[in-house]
Image: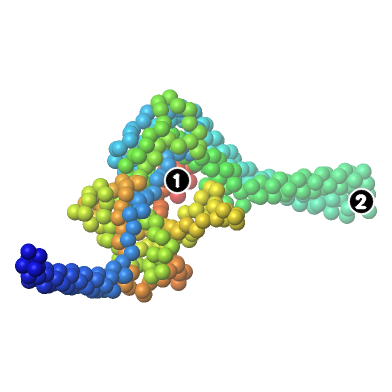
Amino acid sequence: MTSESTPAVTPNAPQQNGKRRRALALLATVAIIAGAGWAAWYLLVARWHQDTDDAYVQGNVVSIVPQTMGTVVSIDADAGMRVEAGQALVHLDPNDAQVAYDQAVANLAGTVRQVRGLYSSVESGQADLAAHQVAVRQAREDVKRREGLVASGAVSREELAHARDILAGAEAALSGAQGQLSRSRALVDATEVASQPQVQAAAGQLRQAWLNLQRMAIVAPVSGHVARREVQLGQRVAPGNTLMTIVPLEQVWVEANFKETQLTKMRIGQPVEVHADLYGSDVRYDGRVASLGMGTGSAFSLLPAQNASGNWIKIVQRVPVRIELDPAQIVEHPLRLGLSMHVDVAVRDQDGAVLASVDAPRSTPLLSTEAYAEQLAQADALIARTIAQNLPATTVARR
């Protein structure tokens, strides 16, 4: 029985071994192809890219603070609203500033009229000096004439002495008139009414009062969206208090935290592909590396790490890399501060620098605002108008 059953099993064994060998060969072929494909992908693509999910949207957060003290009487913007540069956001009670402004206008007008009196005193001083010069000349002639008549006895010595006393008094009066004229001229020499120091001081007070009155309306220095409002109606505010914040969303950037081992081939200017978790992979942002961080996050923390201890464990550090985005794409797909981003940097191009150079310094400010530029120009126009209104009509016509 046993000898008869053995030949029935033997023919199937070579068949099964052949199938197993073919399966193993196919698996090995697939593994080799997959390995070769992965190696080719790594050598041609992957090694020229560095990516991270530790990236977030950052931007400028502009604090709105008052430039003078006051009580809030109206609020014209709330969180989420779009505001433009120069738009009034908060109004303070203007009564105190209005009173100070009116006093400054009156002070400038009075100062201009007083300075006009100084110019008039110079003219009258010149006339007074001429009169004293005539008196001195006459007194000298009288003394000279009497000195010639004393020898003949026609004039007494007492009369000559009296004439000499008159001459001395006239000369003293002339000296006093010259000193007074010099003092008057010192106040107005080489100046016009508008450039006279007293007028300039009064104009400075008016300029400050005008600015304080204008600053009762707190304006937005930049265009953007109100991110947070903290001010309340009736609140007493002082310079330095944050009333609200504005975020210009068209100026946002991405801060990607790369491992220190990923920075070897990273350079400024390299192209970057960015995706936002908000929109998913359907929306792609094109950016570029703007700068590499000057240190790790822990180096600039409030309490930097102290590794000089026996319980030290090496941790791979991360360095922030700033990514600039295409403004047109930001307008089409707006971002918000703090959103999570996925960043992929193409590091094939090695022509860029690791650190920014000073070969081409900026000729314009990085950030600036014109929201306050008109205030001073308006104050100067007000000062010129106040001075002109308090000058003589003939002087105004001549100007």
Q: Give the class, few, some or many, for how many residues have Cα within 10 Å of label 2's Cα (few <14, many ≥20).
A: some
Picture layout, residue 201 above or below residue 96: below
Q: Secondary structure at mark 1?
A: helix
Between 119 and 355, the one lying in front of the other is 355
Q: Which mark is residue 150?
A: 2
Between 145 and 174, the one lying in front of the other is 174
Image quadrant assignment for residue 319: bottom left
Q: Secondary structure at mark 2?
A: helix
Q: Give the class, few, some or many, for how many residues have Cα within 10 Å of label 1's Cα (few <14, many ≥20).
A: some
302 displayed left or right of 169 = left
Q: Which mark is residue 170?
A: none
Image quadrant assignment for residue 247: top left
- Marks 2 and 1 sit apart, C-alpha to C-alpha, by 75 Å
Query: Identity of the amino acid at label 2?
Result: Val
Between 130 and 316, the one lying in front of the other is 316
Picture layout, residue 14 above or below residue 364: below
Q: Residue at x 7, y 70 (%)?
A: 7
Picture layout, residue 383 above or below residue 34: above
Check disc 1 and report the residue beneath it.
376
343 displayed left or right of 236 = left
